[in-house]
């Protein structure tokens, strides 16, 4: 078989025990181009699919971030309410102490001590609740910051991918 103008042939020499033979293999230029074209098309499709997935992930993370912000605002409102209640109890406690001081040392000491103990217990309980709520609030704020950072990185990558 002789080489043609359209195809160049490569001669491969095969060594066998019995004899030496020649085989002609055409150079696969067109099939390589077709394969490369198909691979490029597949890559473009995968890039499009990846962009869609990234967009969906960004939307989902944005939604989760909104939920965390809502929870954070609820916790902040709860902290404000607990602070207000604590302040009211402390004011009430101070009023009772002041009124008992005016009445004299011997009048209703046991009752005053009982009332004071009750208010002190409430104040301690409120302070503990306030402390745990503040801890939860700090954790949620850190989680929101983490999600905001991840969301920003995803958006930056998505924007960069869209540009290139």
Image: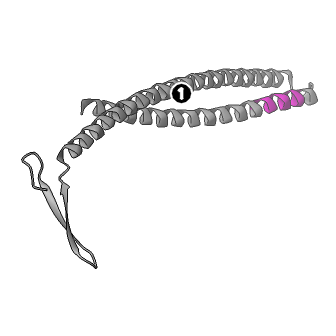
Q: Which of 67 and 15 is in front in this view?
A: 15
- In this view of the protein, can residue 65 be seen by the observer? yes
Picture mark count:
1
**Above or below for 111 versus 36:** above
Look at mark 1 in the image and give the residue it sits on: 64
For the stretch drawn in magenta, what is the main secondary structure? helix
The quarter of the image holding the N terminus is bottom left
Give me the residue at 86% from left, 25% from top.
Answer: 104
- In this view of the protein, can residue 106 be seen by the observer? no
Task: Please provide percent x and percent y for residue 99.
Answer: 80, 20
The quarter of the image holding the C terminus is top left
Q: Which of 7 and 115 is in front in this view?
A: 7
Give me the residue at 81% from left, 25% from top.
Answer: 101
The image quarter in which residue 151 lies: top left
Q: Nearer the viewer, residue 164 or 23?
A: 23
The range drawn in magenta is 112-123
Within 10 angstroms of label 1, few (less than 14), some, or many (20 or more) residues? some
Q: Is residue 112 left or right of residue 41?
A: right
Q: Is residue 76 left or right of residue 162?
A: right
Q: Which of 10 and 20 is in front in this view?
A: 20
Q: In this view, does 37 lie to the left or right of 101?
A: left
Task: Please provide percent x and percent y for residue 49.
Answer: 39, 31
């Amino acid at each position: 078989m002789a080489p043609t103008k359209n195809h160049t042939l490569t001669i491969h020499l095969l060594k066998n025990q019995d004899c030496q033979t020649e085989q002609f293999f055409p150079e696969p230029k067109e099939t390589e181009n077709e394969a490369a074209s198909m691979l490029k098309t597949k890559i473009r499709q995968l890039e499009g699919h990846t962009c869609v997935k990234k967009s969906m992930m960004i939307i989902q993370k944005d939604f989760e971030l909104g939920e965390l912000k809502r929870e954070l605002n609820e916790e902040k409102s709860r902290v404000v309410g607990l602070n207000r209640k604590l302040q009211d109890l402390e004011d009430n406690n101070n009023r009772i102490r002041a009124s008992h001081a005016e009445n004299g040392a011997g009048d209703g000491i046991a009752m005053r001590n009982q009332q004071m103990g009750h208010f002190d217990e409430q104040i301690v309980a409120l302070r503990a609740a306030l402390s745990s709520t503040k801890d939860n609030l700090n954790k949620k704020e850190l989680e929101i910051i983490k999600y905001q950072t991840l969301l920003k990185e995803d958006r930056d990558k998505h924007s960069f991918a869209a540009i290139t």
